[in-house]
Amino acid sequence: MRSSNPVFSRRGFSRDNGYAGFNAQPQAGGPAVGTQGNPYAGNNPYAQNPYAQQDLQYGAPPQAPATTGRMTMDDVVMRTATTLGVLVVTAALAWALLPVDTANINKSYGIAIGAGLVAMVLGFVQAFKRKASPPLILAYAALEGVFLGVLSSIVDNYIASGAAMQAVLGTMAVFVAVLVAYKAGWIRVNRRFYGFVMAAAMGFILLMAVNLLFSVFGGGDGLGFRSGGLGIVFGIIGVLLGACFLALDFKQVEDGIAYGAPREEAWLAAFGLTMTLVWIYLEFLRLIAILQGND
């Protein structure tokens, strides 16, 4: 299975065909080797696990993650905390050091847009790299933090007071709720779920792109998808899509640990989760701005 997250869709923690984890049954403490119910496995007992090939090169079966430097949940948690920590610190510094008063708002906003564009480029570079690059991931987080810090300050000061804190709390609530629902089995991440989320995400992004084009060339708010009643509806849809992305990301991390992904790929998990959380935060910020703003 591959996540909607661009990181995981490029470097899935399962099988290359994009649907591993739906039919596979990982063994406790190690990668899956069974083929029952898997139409892609054929006669190769290691077809489900690309990392198994690394062990077979040495004539031995895959080892348990704990004894061979494989990715663990602790690795994912630590890398994710580091990446998010860098983002939060730079966001706080941008909020404090890049004022958005009348005299400086244009300069601060310009810096934020520049940082956001560079962060987007770095994100795409990392998404298409074969290996995780911690400096690149942390640089992405730092620049994304600058963008979010200034944008949040503008919304908080000029549109909806307290919006930034509300968006943070909302993002945390969604993360915890999806994690609990996923671990409890209330969310079943399977082919149907993956297909539905991908179709919904593509439709959502296409509509937002069309709305942006109309707003750039026609002025105003384009087709009105980001303001008023439609803006609220699309804001809620955006948050729900972010929650679905989180479920897909959790599945990828779970499969990566079960299949014995290398420890360095915990950075990819951290990068992907950070991107998803940024998505959810921005959707909450936009939604709160519409609900509390004057326009």
Image (cartoon, grey):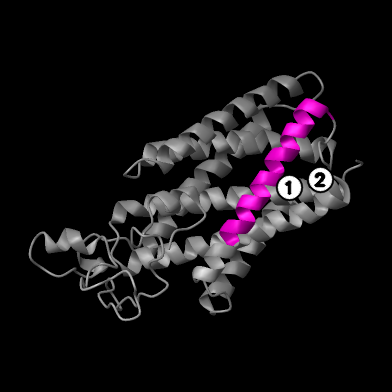
Judged from this view, the residue extending furthest toward the left is 59
Q: Would residue 153 be counted in the magenta stretch?
A: no
Q: Percent position (x, y) of residue 162?
A: 79, 47
Q: Main secondary structure of the magenta part?
A: helix
**Residue at image coords 49%, 71%:** 190
Q: Is residue 288 above or below residue 294?
A: below
Q: Quadrant of the N terminus?
A: bottom left
Gap between marks 1 and 2 measured at Cα: 6 Å
Q: Secondary structure at mark 1?
A: helix
Quarter of the image for residue 171 reads bottom right
Image check: 56 left or right of 50? Answer: left
Quarter of the image for residue 237 reads bottom right
Residue 33 seen anywhere in this rendered image of the structure: yes
Q: Give the residue at mark 1.
A: 285
Q: Which one is in front, 182 or 79?
A: 182
Image check: 107 left or right of 129? Answer: right
Q: Which one is in front, 151 or 54?
A: 54
Local packing at callout 1 (Cα closer than 10 Å; few below 14, some 14-19, many 20+) is many
Residue 169 seen anywhere in this rendered image of the structure: no
Q: Are marks 1 and 2 in contact (CB under 8 Å)?
A: yes
Q: Secondary structure at mark 2?
A: helix
> What range is drawn magenta here?
197-219
Q: Give the residue at mark 2.
A: 289
**Amino acid type shown at disc 2:** Ala
**Residue at image coords 79%, 44%:** 226
Q: Which one is in front, 71 or 62?
A: 62
Local packing at callout 2 (Cα closer than 10 Å; few below 14, some 14-19, many 20+) is many
**Residue at image coords 57%, 30%:** 117
**Amino acid type shown at disc 1:** Leu
Image check: 201 left or right of 26? Answer: right
Q: Which one is in front, 34 or 86?
A: 34
